[in-house]
Image: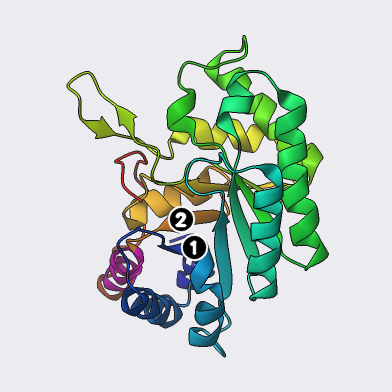
Amino acid sequence: MKYSYSELAKMIDHSLLHPTMTDADLEAGCKLAAQYQVASVCIKPYAVKQAVGWLSGSGLLVGCVIGFPHGNSATESKRYETELACKDGANEIDMVVNLGKALGGDWGYVEADVKAVCDEAHKHGAKVKVIFENDYLTNGGAGLSSDDFKRKLCEICERAGADWVKTSTGYGFVKQADGSYNYKGATEHDLALMRASCSSKVQVKAAGGVRDLDGLIKVQDLGGSRCGATATAAMMDDYRKREATGTLEGAGGKIGSGGY
C-alpha cells in the first residue's frame, strides 16, 4: 500500500449533515471521527460550538457548512453565517456557490459571493472549501460546456481566495426521467478536471460517491486532498482488515456510486 492509515484517514471530513441527525447523533459522530483520527468533522452551523467541545483534545478540526445545501442565501447572510461559525470555533468553512447566478453568467456576483466568505473566514484563521454541485452542471451554462463551466468556476474561486474547490454537497439530487431523484456526486472525470483547473495553491475535495476504501484511494490518486464521507468506519476498518491479512497492495477502485 502506497498510503499509510494516517495519510488516508487525514483525507476524511466526517460528514454530520443529514437534516434528521439529533444532537445525540452529532455527538456520537464526533466521537467516531475522533476514534478514527480523521481530518475533521463537517457539521451543521448550530452545532459548531458543541462539536468543538466534543472534540477537545482530539486534534481534529471542526468544519461548518454555509449556505447549505443550495447556495441561495444572500451574500451578507453567508458572510455573517461564516463569522458566527468562526467565532464558535470552526476551522474550516464549506460554502455553496450561488448556482443560479453562475448559470446565468453573472460571474461578478459569484466571485464577490465567494470572496466575501473567504475574506471573513481568513480573517479568523479558517480555510474555505467552495462547493460547485456538479450534478447540476451536466449541461453547462452561460454559453459554456459542462467542463468549461467547471473550469471557469475553478478560476473564479481561486481568484476569490478559496483554499479548496469541492465537487458536491452530497444532497444535489436531480429529478430522473421516472420521477425519482438521484445523483452521482464526485466522479473521476470531475476530480481530474478540477485538479487540472487550479494551481497548486488550491486543493480539491470530493464529496458524494466515495463510500469505500478503494474509492478513497482513487481520490488521492486523482489529486484530491480531502473527501467528505459518512462511511468513515467502513473505509478505515477495511484498511486495518487488509493490513492484517496482507492484502493492501493493489487497492484502488472507482468513484461515483452515489451517497455521501
Asked if residue 235 is among those painted magenta in the image, a careful observer would answer yes
Q: Quadrant of residue 243?
A: bottom left
Asked if residue 199 is among those painted magenta in the image, a careful observer would answer no
- Decide if residue 164 is in sight here: yes
| Residue 79 spot, x, y in % from top left | 71, 53
Q: Which residues are magenta?
A: 232-242
Residue drawn at 63 percent across, 26 percent down: 101
| Residue 218 spot, x, y in % from top left | 44, 47
Q: CA distance from mark 2 to mark 1?
A: 5 Å
Q: Quadrant of the N terminus?
A: bottom left
| Residue 98 spot, x, y in % from top left | 60, 35
Residue highlighted by disc 1: 13
Residue 191 lies left or right of residue 241; in this view the side is right
Secondary-structure class at tag 1:
strand
Front one among 255 and 70: 70
Q: Quadrant of residue 126?
A: bottom right
Front one among 68 and 159: 68
Residue drawn at 33 percent across, 35 percent down: 183
Residue type at tag 1 = Asp
- Decide if residue 197 is in sight here: no
In the displayed structure, 46 sits above or below 105; it is below
Residue 191 lies left or right of residue 230; in this view the side is right
Residue drawn at 77 percent across, 38 percent down: 112
Q: Point out which mark residue 133 bears.
A: none
Q: Point out which mark residue 228 bears.
A: 2
Residue type at tag 2 = Gly
